[in-house]
Amino acid sequence: MINTFDILETIRMIQDECLDIRTTTMGISLLDCGDTDIDRSCQKIYDKICRRAEHLVAVGEGIEKEYGIPIINKRVSVTPIAIMAGISGGDPVKYALTLEKAAQTIGVNFIGGYSALVQKGFAAGDLALMESIPEALAATEHLCSSVNIGSTKAGINMDAVKLMGQQVKKAAELTAAQNCIAAGKLVVFCNAPEDNPFMAGAFHGVSEPDCVINVGVSGPGVVRAAVAKYPDYSINEIAELIKKTAFKVTRMGQLVGTLASERLGVPFGIVDLSLAPTPAVGDSVAHILEEIGLEQCGGAGTTACLAMLNDAVKKGGVMASSSVGGLSGAFIPVSEDAGMIAAARSGALSIEKLEAMTAVCSVGLDMIVVPGDTTPEVISGIIADEAVIGMVNGKTTAVRIIPAIGKTVGEELEFGGLLGSGPVMAVNTKSPAIFINRGGRIPAPLHSLKN
């Protein structure tokens, strides 16, 4: 039974500790929209998205008003568009413009799925879509793109790694006048999940239902506030406290997902447990680590603190939901986290330290701003390093890196909103060009042979 204390505690979390539902994301399969005529395929896609997601925003707003729970974003993810392009041929940018039009019609914040899954090689449509990504993202406002270039089972497609280093740079160059925003809507994955509700990496996997609702929670501010109340707790007591707090946060996500599912008439998929920070004061993963006892995020002990936090969030959250999925961990996006921004500005946090942190947390190098003259080969090298961490450890890793065209270390890119502002971080410029240009594939690790 819900008691008065629980209700008041939730109200306090929302008002004072930045608790919110970060996103309700409707996944929509486009497999029945394929057509050998690209224009007919685009029309089918537009019609299906508008039919399925017609009430997504209104339902979300209704739940917000009825329960007082902020739902920051309403989003749609679709089947990887490379599959559609493989059936129809033609210019994939037509699909990008169709998705943008659909997003505007239904009023969502973002639409994801301009994606390709190439971990083991290129199928029909994959290369055409990947080559079109910079143009597609520059020509749209709400579209997000992702490419999965590796997995624990398949290894890493180094030809795709090389191409994506080039495409990240091109995307930044095409939108240099808009703070290189196209690169901020592009993520390169290893072990990408098919039910991720978070952008820019959301797409609707081919094994998913025809339509489904997935929810992503937030809650860094709530966890930090809980830790701050007990300065004398031991580490195992802190871990237990975080577990209990994550349980409460996830229950709210479960509630919203269930309500949205019932009102939209589509199945409820998963709750993603990820602690998703924002630039707002009091809503930072880095500040949780500092509350636990670090002088500043990035210093000695950061990786250990983050591992404990991530584990406790998962243990607490998994008991609170009937279905946990997506990424489920702690996000460490530099530009979207006030504490990470401060640590990067002060020099306490480097890309190398962030890379170490990604071995124990959710996703990877996220919203990292680097000098505009960073070469595509260096970007590809960073992607390869991060992908190997994911491949060897059997976890999801990713890179969302933004070359700040015309800017150098110490300057900043200002994105606004949830994307925040990114200090330009120093990059090791020693070239991996010979390695990257070899192409081929890094074989899967021995422990992938589990059958």
Image: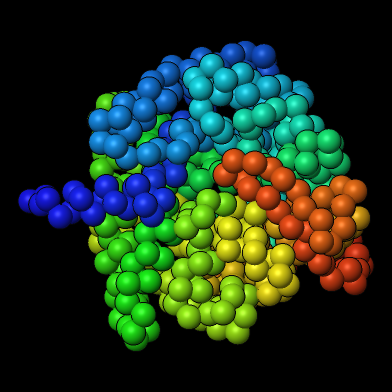
Q: What quarter of the picture does the C terminus occupy?
A: bottom left
Taking the spot 57% from the left edge, 20% from the top edge, the residue there is: 104
Determine the residue positioned at 65% across, 60% down.
341
Q: Nearer the viewer, residue 89 or 42?
A: 42
Left or right of residue 221, residue 132 in this image? right
Most distant residue in the left direction:
1
- Nearest to the observer: residue 42 or residue 153: 42
The residue under the point 78% across, 41% down is 179
**Is residue 20 shown to the viewer in this render?**
yes
Q: Vertically, is 409 above or below 44? A: below
Picture residue at 73% right of the left edge, 40% below the top:
181
Residue 55 image-quadrant placement: top left
Please give left or right for residue 135 compared with residue 114 in the image: right
Q: Position of residue 167 (x, y in %)?
A: 80, 45
Answer yes or no: is residue 376 visible.
no
Q: Report x, y in % for residue 446.
A: 59, 77
- Residue in the foreground of this view, choosing between 401 and 203: 401
123 w.r.t. 26: above or below: below
Protein image colouring = rainbow
- Quarter location, residue 134: top right
**Coordinates of residue 28 in the picture (x, y in percent):** 46, 31
